[in-house]
Image (cartoon, rainbow, N blue to C red):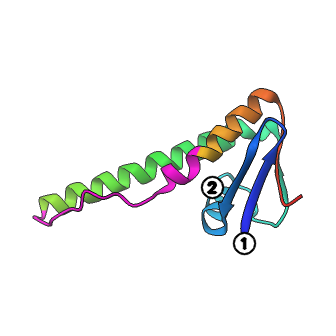
Amino acid sequence: MIYKFQSKADSDLFMNVGPAQRILSIIGKSAEPQGIIEPAEMPAAIAALEAAVNEEEQARSAAVESATADGQVVSAAQPIGLKQRAWPFIQMLKRCQQADTPVVWGV
């Protein structure tokens, strides 16, 4: 399943089910087939996503430091994380908040 987030203030944003459900969970929304994020909810949603991204980045840095301290070889390649998945959604929320327009999906 693919989620299609839509708003009159921005282009459509398509997201696979796994990342979409994770992002919706972080902002306190149910991963229902249909939903809406009102402009009044957007500041809290943006803050929650940015906090989750920072938390994941700090955990990843701590794990790399720990592995390096233990003498393990750490790969330079970084997996795709929440930062890369959430960035387009955060940008969409910011533009929609500025335009006072909701974001909907499944309609």
The reply to whether residue 17 is in sight is yes
Q: Residue at x 74, y 62 (%)?
A: 3
Q: Residue at x 76, y 35 (%)?
A: 96
User: For the magenta stretch, what is the residue range?
Assistant: 70-87
Q: Amino acid at mark 2?
A: Ile
- Residue 66, position in %: x, y? 21, 59
* Circle 2 Cα neighbour tier, 10 Å, few/some/many (<14 / 14–19 / ≥20): some
Q: Which of the 4 image quadrants contains residue 98?
A: top right
Left or right: residue 96 versus residue 49 is right
Q: Residue at x 83, y 30 (%)?
A: 100
- Residue 34, position in %: x, y? 85, 61
94 or 54, which is in the foreground? 94
The reply to whether residue 48 is in sight is no
Q: Which residue is mark 2?
A: 26
* Quadrant of the rendering where the N terminus is positioned: bottom right
Q: What secondary structure do most residues of the magenta stretch adopt? A: loop
Mark 1 vs mark 2: which is more N-terminal?
Answer: 1
Left or right: residue 29 versus residue 25 is right
53 or 11, which is in the foreground? 11
